[in-house]
Image (cartoon, rainbow, N blue to C red):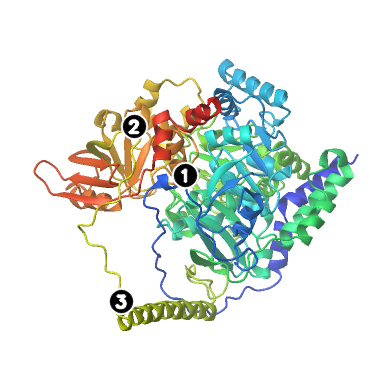
Amino acid sequence: MFAPVRRSLALAASRGGRQVLLSARSQRPLSIPRVRTAAYTTTPRLRQEAFHSQLENAPPLPSAKSATQTPQTLTEKIVQRYSVGLAPGKTVKSGDYVTLAPHHCMTHDNSWPVAMKFMSIGASKIHDNRQVVMTLDHDVQNKSEANLKKYRQIEEFAGKHGVDFYPAGRGIGHQIMVEEGYAWPGTVTVASDSHSNMYGGVGCLGTPMVRTDAASIWATGRTWWQIPPIAKVTLTGILPIGVTGKDVIVALCGLFNNDDVLNHAIEFTGSEETLRSISVDDRLAIANMTTEWGALSGLFPIDSVLQQWLRAKATTAAMFDPEAAKGKFTHEKIDDLINNQLRADPGATYAKSLYLNLSTLSPFVAGPNSVKVATPLKDLEAQNIKLNKAYLVSCTNSRASDIAAAANVFREAAKDGVTPKVADGVKFYIAAASTLEQAAAEEAGDWQVLLAAGAEPLPSGCGPCIGLGTGLLEPGEVGISASNRNFKGRMGSTDAKAYLASPEVVAASALKGKIAGPGWYQKPEGVEKVIIGEGNGDVMQDKAISIEEALDKLIAQADSMIATAEKEFSGEEAAAEPAASEEETLTEILPGFPEKIEGEIVFCDADNINTDGIYPGKYTYQDNVTTEKMAEVCMENYDKEFGKVAKEGDILVSGFNFGCGSSREQAATAILAKKIPLVVSGSFGNIFSRNSINNALMGVEVPRLVQRLRETFKAGADGEKVLTRRTGWKLVWDVRRSKVTVREGEGGKEWSQKVGELPPNVQEIIARGGLEKWVKSQIEA
């Protein structure tokens, strides 16, 4: 008889106060503070010389101050707690390499490939079975014997090692990590999936690892990590009625779309009033899609909103399942969290600061086929874009509060008590983030409203979001989804168009048969555009910071001038700039490792080529794909002609942020299968960098080369850009001298540039065939 009460409490906890907040806001007018803003300009992003600088045994950066003297960001404080082997008094900071012992590590359908890696390196026992969580969520609709066998193998392996296991249909792994308390505030929790960032919505530093890293954690309890540059994103104002967390992150991805936070850790902050307007469910959606924004984590503070959410979870657990809740959601554990609360120190150093005024935000839609194209809903409504499919699925936006928002769209459109139907010619697919979220939606009657409207239910899992199972987009179709990623071909055909929006916009679009909203948005008085920029959004504070930075620069210049004058006065000569003819610093080359890598450049002229573009999602969870097949499908979602143009031994060159997106290691191994030994880009996505090192694919960043290729090979007279081009240019990477030399065609200009070093320890990993084989060799030794 307690089931309705329990589900209602669970629903209240999962909503995190969204409806209460909306009600409270609706009783007072919204006003926008008059803030003088400067034109937004993108600051130069911090870019490493080459991604292979992220090494396990690279020398740690020295710390000049003691732990009590050095202000730390929230990210640094959490990492400090979960780093092992630190020198006494060592205060970790951005840029440091640390050995992490994560609180938890989650794997999903890739658990069996991870298990095979684990066994292949000679490991036989999981180091800490309480650290590991396994969930089956990606290909849950696949009832083939091969997939069912893999699922059985994962379950049996988990049972053998005493690992917490959640079967297919129970829910999406990231949702399970949050609702079951594994992703706990103030901890580091990782997963072999790119949307681990979602844990930041509950104050947990979530970041993705790759399969090889997961195997290392299983075997040793730890892995390596370099603390990224940390960006502070200040949110000001409050969310207007009809604007959601999804609109916030879609706007951030689309308005700050020049790799502003690429490979950064993000910390969201704001006033108490601002943060009260963002429910936990909205925070989860925002943190989830910081992945698409290019970040490695998206961390919200441990504040009163989160504490209330935790208290509701603990009360529910204490009332109905006290035994199962032990060690997860308890009031004692929350008390300890509050009494030892982590927060960023005043004066902590951030690589950059950005701000967004929430009060100026309206509903936004991303796409088509890119999260970096964000358009106000009203502009797309005017275009009358017809739809074929709509999706309320994924770990981003299919919790009970999202389902309730979608159901309310249909309730409000009802006439004479009759629920309207989904528009003719439109299919509307729904799948809850977990069975607990679906049960809460059913208890509230929201699930039934959507079914009565004609929505087609799918099992709780990733499904269409990852391009698996029922309801994929066909050639020429247009779809709108509440999920997180709309890369070309991800949700079906590469000839389809996919948009992303909030649950209520998705539902309204399904109802009307075209991209449309429910009409809930109330534009605050005086709002004409979205206010964004660099800094904290406080003119006086930002001005003070600018003055302080200018003074620091002047002081440094003065110190330098004084030092030079002192040397001249004492008869010493100031140190001269190193002459160009000075002897080069040479890198040691291991026996048998090639001193030079050379080949013809094949140019894929695009930025943000994601892992779906490199290796299609439909093959990712097929464990029996041959090397030949991997080579055949390599880059096909980016360009179907790539396989015909690229040849063995070529050097693949692409634009900036190559390899962004999911954590699939096949993005690296498919390029190797194509027998391409080297990838060059303007910059790499961090997860691809990590996978490349771990799988013995070499890469180097040369922004100048990308610029020269684009200057030389422009779009044709018809404006069409060649996606994959044989250039006739030759590139030589001199590993010993850490230098690339480019010859721009037969008889063309030749130039050289220094690049990042490929040190012997990485050479050894590559020579062994990747980190997995290197670890095995160390175990055997």
Instruction: Determine the residue located farthest toward the right in the rendered image.
Output: 1
Q: Earlier in the sequence, mark 2 or mark 1?
A: 1
In the picture, measured across the screen, residue 584 lies left or right of residue 135, that is left
Three-letter code, disc 3: Glu
Instruction: Determine the residue located farthest toward the front in the rendered image.
Output: 571
Q: Earlier in the sequence, mark 1 or mark 3?
A: 1
> Considering the image in quadrants, where does the N terminus appear?
top right
Q: Nearer the viewer, mark 3 or mark 2?
A: 3
Three-letter code, disc 2: Pro
Q: Which residue is mark 1?
A: 55
Determine the secondary structure under disc 3: loop
- Residue 491 at x, y = what percent? 48, 36
Q: Residues within 10 Å of mark 1 (few under 14, many from 20)?
A: some
Q: Which residue is mark 3?
A: 572
| Disc assigned to residue 228 | none
Foreground of the two, 645 or 50: 50
Three-letter code, disc 1: Leu
Q: Is residue 433 above or below residue 26?
A: above
Q: Earlier in the sequence, mark 3 or mark 2?
A: 3
Q: Nearer the viewer, mark 1 or mark 3?
A: 3
Q: Residue at x 40, y 65 (%)?
A: 43
Q: Residue at x 62, y 35 (%)?
A: 220
Q: Residues within 10 Å of mark 3 (few under 14, many from 20)?
A: few
Q: Which residue is mark 2?
A: 591
Disc 3 from disc 2: Cα separation: 44 Å
- Residue 225 at x, y = what percent? 54, 47
